[in-house]
Image: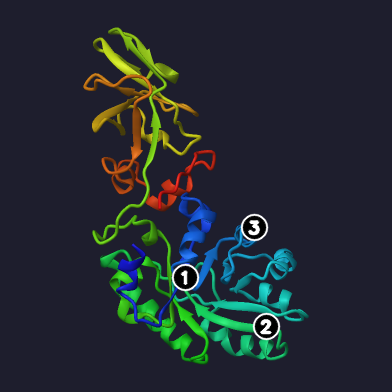
Amino acid sequence: NLNFLKKKLKPKTKIIAVVKAFAYGHGDIEIAKFLEKQDIYAFWVADFEEGVILRKNGIAVPIIVANASPKSISQIIKYNLDIVVYNFRILDSIIDIKKSLNLHLKFNCGMNRYGFAVEDISIIKKKLSKNSNLNISSICSHLSSSRTPKKDETTKNELKKFKEIASNFSDKIYKHILNTSGIIRFAEHQYSAVRAGIGIFGIHKNTGLQQIGKLTTTISQIRHINKGEIIGYGGHFQANKKIKIGVVPFGYADGLDRKLGNSNGSLFVNGIKCEILGEISMDSCVINLNDSNAVEGDRVEIFGSNNSINSICKKIDSIPYEFLSKINRRIKRKYIS
């Protein structure tokens, strides 16, 4: 996936890998260690705690903290982290700092989330000129709709605004606005850096990317129930005939959305699609094994080659970002080189 994205980029364009939210549920430390060996320029995290974890585990490249609070500045400096500055509250909290700090100035180009306004540029420059310890490492923004073709006019307007903002800063300062969909669909608008997140993990409609992970568990117990018997809390499922069922030790606390219950979703056993029957419990769910020759201990696919994350999300009106970020950290991750 990384190579696929690199082919869209110019040779000198730097990649900032987004590994926030436990690397989208995949495990931040292991993913970051692997990516650091692939010439990644920097890592993008949500808060300083995520950055500290990476630094304590040996990550040496720049780590950019996207949403730092003034109270976290001392820790950011202690662990040599970079900071995204997107308003004057944060800027004023570091303006008199006595130690070196790398800044990434974020501007709002239309998404109306984090970011300075273009009109703030002169004031920002004036404030920063008073302290040589503050180094502008990059200028950045975020696209609101780059994955949605119907919103391409919106994306083009945001890119146009960023071009205006970028023109106010030295060519020596990195600029980045493209995310995964931006890289794939608007590569001609790349600057000196890009941010790649979900695409690294292959969760995208583009067929050039491949989902890197699969999530499996095993069948804990098999039983046969008779016509009229119920399954799960509330008894929402009642058998209309004798059926074979399997209890799976994976529930909503593990990240299995409750909306997949009551036959809305399925898991796969030995390549056979098995409906989820009744309500999903905190630590378990029940599947229909009538069409399967499964036995206790057989492997169950939550998602993988038979059950893509995108297809699951369609059933529950969700997005892969949300689904992956809800996978509990208690789930064991195994990395295959």
Residue type indicated by callout 3: Glu
Residue count near mark 2 (Cα–Cα under 10 Å), binned few <14, some 14–19, many ≥20: some
- Can you tell which of label 1 and label 2 is closer to the viewer? 1
Colour mapping: rainbow
The numbered disc on residue 40 is: 1
- Can you tell which of label 1 and label 3 is closer to the viewer? 1
The numbered disc on residue 49 is: 3
Residue 6 higher or lower than 216, as above or below: below
Task: Describe the element under mark 1 as helix, strand or loop.
Answer: loop
* Quarter holding residue 179: bottom left
Residue drawn at point x = 72 percent, y = 65 percent: 75
Q: Can you give x and y, in whole percent of width and height, for residue 252 in the image?
A: 47, 34
Task: Describe the element under mark 2 as helix, strand or loop.
Answer: strand
* Quarter holding residue 276: top left
Of residues 240 and 7, which is closer to you in this image? 7
The residues tagged by marks 1 and 2 sit, at their Cα atoms, a distance apart of: 24 Å
Of residues 81 and 89, which is closer to you in this image? 81
Q: What residue would you read off at disc 2? A: 134
The residues tagged by marks 3 and 2 sit, at their Cα atoms, a distance apart of: 22 Å
In this orientation, does residue 145 appear?
A: no
